[in-house]
Image (tube, rainbow, N blue to C red):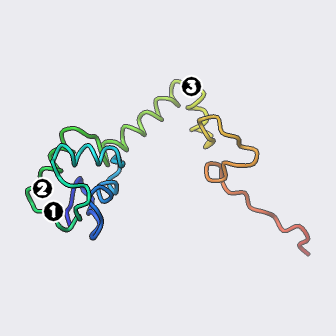
Amino acid sequence: MPRIAGVDLPRNKRIEIALTYIFGIGRKNSHEILTKAKIDFGKSSDDLNEKQVKQIRDIINEDYKVEGPLRTEIQMNIKRLIDIGSYRGYRHKRGLPAHGQNTRNNARTRRSKRRSSPANKK
């Protein structure tokens, strides 16, 4: 089980899918990384040798921001929006959707869950 960027990649998955378990790497970035490393997309994550794992690790370290630093950057961007008082910052601060979605019927996950009070409690 290879360990890349502090994440244990899952066993018995194709490497193009296994790389997406790293925060900040999706399918597109996974394809780019494997193309640079000249590794077949369909190869299993268990079938990689140490040289290939090191090659992937080096490409990710030099070209991509993943896991901790990426999370920190995202949080700093949100904090900056809140500090300058922008509309998006205001929405983040209030815990509401920031991209114009409807909140009357939807946005249940973004807004807090409303507890229903028992109607006919005696």
Q: Residue furthest left?
A: 51
4 displayed left or right of 67: left
Q: Position of residue 86 (x, y in %)?
A: 57, 25
Q: Position of residue 16 (x, y in %)?
A: 29, 55
Q: Could you tell me which secondary element the residue under label 1 belongs to?
A: loop
The residue beneath circle 2 is 52
**Separation (CA) of disc 2 from disc 1:** 6 Å
The residue beneath circle 1 is 48
Residue depth check, mark 1 versus mark 3: number of the one nearer the observer = 1
Q: Could you tell me which secondary element the residue under label 2 belongs to?
A: helix
**Separation (CA) of disc 3 from disc 2:** 47 Å
**Separation (CA) of disc 1 from disc 3:** 49 Å
Quadrant placement of the N terminus: bottom left
Give me the residue at 21% from left, 45% from top.
35
The residue beneath circle 3 is 85
Q: Position of residue 6 (x, y in %)?
A: 24, 56
Q: Residue furthest bottom?
A: 122
Give me the residue at 23% from left, 53% from top.
5
Q: Earlier in the sequence, mark 3 or mark 2?
A: 2
76 displayed left or right of 83: left
Q: Residues within 10 Å of mark 3 (few under 14, many from 20)?
A: few
Q: Earlier in the sequence, mark 1 or mark 3?
A: 1
Q: Quadrant of residue 36?
A: top left
75 displayed left or right of 10: right
Q: Amino acid at mark 1?
A: Leu
